[in-house]
Image: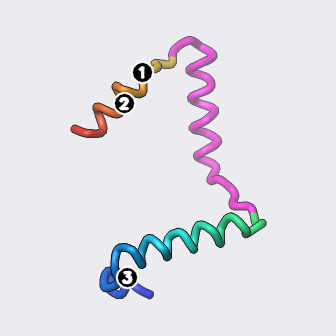
Amino acid sequence: MNTSEIIRISQFERLQTIEAIWDSLIHDNSEIESPEWHQDMLAARKRKIDESAAEFRPIAELKSRQSR
């Protein structure tokens, strides 16, 4: 199924399809490896925290930035 075919079905049917896909993934026992850059990013963030160089912001501030 391609994007143009997906667009033709109702929003409700698309949501049902998404739910079915998520359900199928939950029951899939295979592991997906995170890319190496994820580990690099986490290490860099941890380093900033350990060095007291991290900047923390309240969730409300982050949400207000999203709506702009």
Give the residues drawn in magenta, as a range.
Answer: 31-53
> Distance of mark 2 from mark 3, alpha carbons?
33 Å
The correct choice, above or below, for 53 with respect to 2 in the image is: above
Give the mark nearest the N terminus, 1 or 2. Answer: 1
Main secondary structure type of the part rendered in magenta: helix
Give the mark nearest the N terminus, 2 or 3. Answer: 3
* Residue on which disc 2 sits: 62
Disc 3 marks a residue whose amino acid type is: Ile
Considering every residue shown, the one lying at the far right of the view is 29
Give the mark nearest the N terminus, 3 or 1. Answer: 3
Circles 3 and 1: CB atoms closer than 8 Å: no
Considering every residue shown, the one lying at the far front of the view is 12
Q: Secondary structure at mark 2?
A: helix
Q: Residue at x 58, y 19 (%)?
A: 49
Q: Secondary structure at mark 1?
A: loop
Circles 2 and 3: CB atoms closer than 8 Å: no
Query: Of 66 and 12, which appears nearest the observer?
Result: 12
> Distance of mark 3 from mark 1, alpha carbons?
39 Å
Q: Residue at x 65, y 68 (%)?
A: 25
Circles 1 and 2: CB atoms closer than 8 Å: yes
Query: Of 18 and 29, which appears nearest the observer?
Result: 18
Residue 20: image quadrant is bottom right
* Mark number, residue 57: 1
Give the crowd class for mark 1: few <14, some 14-19, many >=20 residues within 10 Å: few
Mark 3 vs mark 1, foreground winner is 3
Q: Residue at x 59, y 67 (%)?
A: 22
Disc 1 marks a residue whose amino acid type is: Arg
Residue 65: image quadrant is top left
* Mark number, residue 6: 3
Please indicate whether residue 24 sits to the left or right of residue 60 in the image.
Answer: right
Give the crowd class for mark 3: few <14, some 14-19, many >=20 residues within 10 Å: few
